[in-house]
Image (cartoon, rainbow, N blue to C red):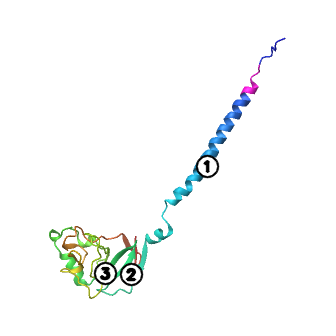
Amino acid sequence: MADTTVPTGHGHDEDSSRRDFLLTSTVVVGGAGVIAAALPFIDYMNPSADVLALASLEFDLSGVEEGQSITVMWRKKPVFIRRRTSTEIKEAEEVPLSQLKDPQPDSERVEKPEWLVMVGICTHLGCIPKGQAPGDPKGEYGGWFCPCHGSHYDTSGRIRKGPAPRNLEVPPYEFTGDTTILIG
């Protein structure tokens, strides 16, 4: 005799919901695994602690006397900081922009007129210009001189003579106090 029972369909619904649960669980666990595997790679792309330490530099300028220049290192680059004399400030402000290869008024290069802050790397081929030490040649304009190829910079770090195409770069900086500067 043949079985005449009609399937009720309850087994089919149970299989379907179990299959949906297993599929959802597999996707969630797989997604979590992908995220867990990707996090070390993403973290690897973040800057290291030594790079973050070099990102900014705070420096006290209270010991720098008028007419004196110092060099500090920021992001492995020399930064020239000069406390300019009133004569140097006046010379820098009076230069006609038409005489400059890379025209930029002195007021755009300084936050406080007596303090000049710039990256000490010649814009021609990356040499370090002379002019920081008291006995160094300062070039024809009283600022800095790059002996490698003869670039002359004025008391505002602007290119005046020679092959350098641009002025010495002014890094991002701000004064956090009367004599405290934050570079970067």
Q: Are marks 1 and 3 in contact (CB under 8 Å)?
A: no
Query: For the point 15% across and 71% down, which residue is it?
Result: 99
Front residue (pair 15, 180) = 15
Picture quarter containing residue 88?
bottom left
Q: Position of residue 83 (x, y in %)?
A: 31, 82
Q: Hey, what amino acid is under mark 1?
A: Gly
Q: Which residue is mark 2?
A: 179
Circle 1 sits on which residue? 33
* Image: magenta residue range: 7-12
Identified at 38% across, 82% down, the residue is 61
The residue that label 3 is drawn on is 82
Disc 3 residue type (three-letter): Arg
Quarter of the image where one finds residue 112: bottom left
Secondary structure under the numbered disc 1 in the rendered image: helix
- The correct choice, above or below, for 157 with respect to 47 in the image is below
Real-space Cα separation, disc 2 to disc 3, in angstroms: 13 Å
